[in-house]
């Protein structure tokens, strides 16, 4: 089912890119350009989205020789969880950000990474950190990381194409294949929104599953609940300077949220996630 959802969502993202290209460049030629871009972006995103996400976040490797103090804090708990979940050990990273947050990326469990911020390590105790890592490994186990990584890459490309339309226009103006100015304006406005809506669909429906995985494999929903409460307070106090195209990848949206409509939130409300976990603790 997850594979089917991934294929459908990738198809939607590719269709958005093709329609945006047709509106910008005009006619069948524009549609062809959009198809080539969509194919190229999906290929690039499949093989390189992990590196792009880590580079965009400024993540630094964590292992026995690099940031070893952090490794010996989070490495053993990560290994325990991967053994319980039947997963290979992911690469670990730290993001030099004061805001508490984390994300997982990669194309499959054998090629996966988990990154946490410095702020998260400062704010949380070990059991809460373990719950956060369990959540991210839940995304890995549920095969969420590929679609999330590709969505980030393709959504960024769609937004970039809209910027091209805004500043340069495009297409020939002297024939029937010239782009319609009204359509082009709509593309500039709607393409990033459409990409954001797809991101929202990807993230909102899968966060509950990752939360449940954290509760299951750490042995109790209580630590995940405590971690979510700290994450919510931390995000409001210290909004994170993150790329909008990557916002759906984080365990909690990396913005204060006061200026954003809940309609376009890439995550379910934290209170709703906590309520789901509390129901798990009573079953």
Image (spheres, rainbow, N blue to C red):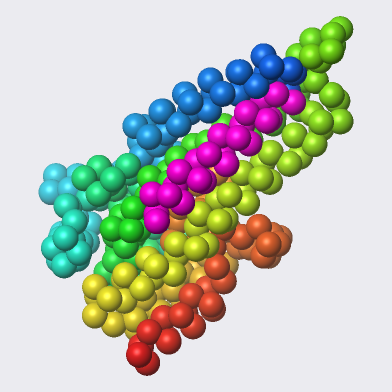
Q: Is residue 103 visible?
A: no
Q: Is residue 18 magenta?
A: yes
Q: Quadrant of the C terminus?
A: bottom left
Q: Residue at x 49, y 83 (%)?
A: 275
Q: Main secondary structure of the magenta part?
A: helix
Residue lying at 32% horizontally and 42% vertically, measured from the top left: 107
Q: Position of residue 64 (x, y in %)?
A: 13, 49
Q: How many marks?
A: 0
Quadrant location of residue 166? top right
Q: Is residue 197 visible?
A: yes
As drawn, 126 above or below 100: below
Q: Nearer the viewer, residue 266 or 230?
A: 266
Q: Is residue 208 above or below residue 32?
A: below
Q: Is residue 44 magenta?
A: no
Residue occupying the point 45% across, 56% down: 250
- In the foreground, 8 or 281: 8
Query: Residue 60: percent from the left, percent from the top?
Result: 31, 43
Identify the residue shown where x is 68% and y is 46%: 193
Q: Nearer the viewer, residue 249 or 154?
A: 154
Quarter of the rendering occupied by the N terminus = bottom left
Residue 255 in the image: state x and y as whole percent: 58, 58
**Which residue of the protein is positioned furthest toward the top in this rendering?**
174
Q: Is residue 41 left or right of residue 124?
A: right
- The x, y position of residue 254, in whole percent, is 53, 57
**270 vs 136: above or below:** below
Q: Report the magenta residues as a range.
A: 1-23
Residue 93 horizontal side relative to residue 241, left or right: left
């Amino acid at each position: 089912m997850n594979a089917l959802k991934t294929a459908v969502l990738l198809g939607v993202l590719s269709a958005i890119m093709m329609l945006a290209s047709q509106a910008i460049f005009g006619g069948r030629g524009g549609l062809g350009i959009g198809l080539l871009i969509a194919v190229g972006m999906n290929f690039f995103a499949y093989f390189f989205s992990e590196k792009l996400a880590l580079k965009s976040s400024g993540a630094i490797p964590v292992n026995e020789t690099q940031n070893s103090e952090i490794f010996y804090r989070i490495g053993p708990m990560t290994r325990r969880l991967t053994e319980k979940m039947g997963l290979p050990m992911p690469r670990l990273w730290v993001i030099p950000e004061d805001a508490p947050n984390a994300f997982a990326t990669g194309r499959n469990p054998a090629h996966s990474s988990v990154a946490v911020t410095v702020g998260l390590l400062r704010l949380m105790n070990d059991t809460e950190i373990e719950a956060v890592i369990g959540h991210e490994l839940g995304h890995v186990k549920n095969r969420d990381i590929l679609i999330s990584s590709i969505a980030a890459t393709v959504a960024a490309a769609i937004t970039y194409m809209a910027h091209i339309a805004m500043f340069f226009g495009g297409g020939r103006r002297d024939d029937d294949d010239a782009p319609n100015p009204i359509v082009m304006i709509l593309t500039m406005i709607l393409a990033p929104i459409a990409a954001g809506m797809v991101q929202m669909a990807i993230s909102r429906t899968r966060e509950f599953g990752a939360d449940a995985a954290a509760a299951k494999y750490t042995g109790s929903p209580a630590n995940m609940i405590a971690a979510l409460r700290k994450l919510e307070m931390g995000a409001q106090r210290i909004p994170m300077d993150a790329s909008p195209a990557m916002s759906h990848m984080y365990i909690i949206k990396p913005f204060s949220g006061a200026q954003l409509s809940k309609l376009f939130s890439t995550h379910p409300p934290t209170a709703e996630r906590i309520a789901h976990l509390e129901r798990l603790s009573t079953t």
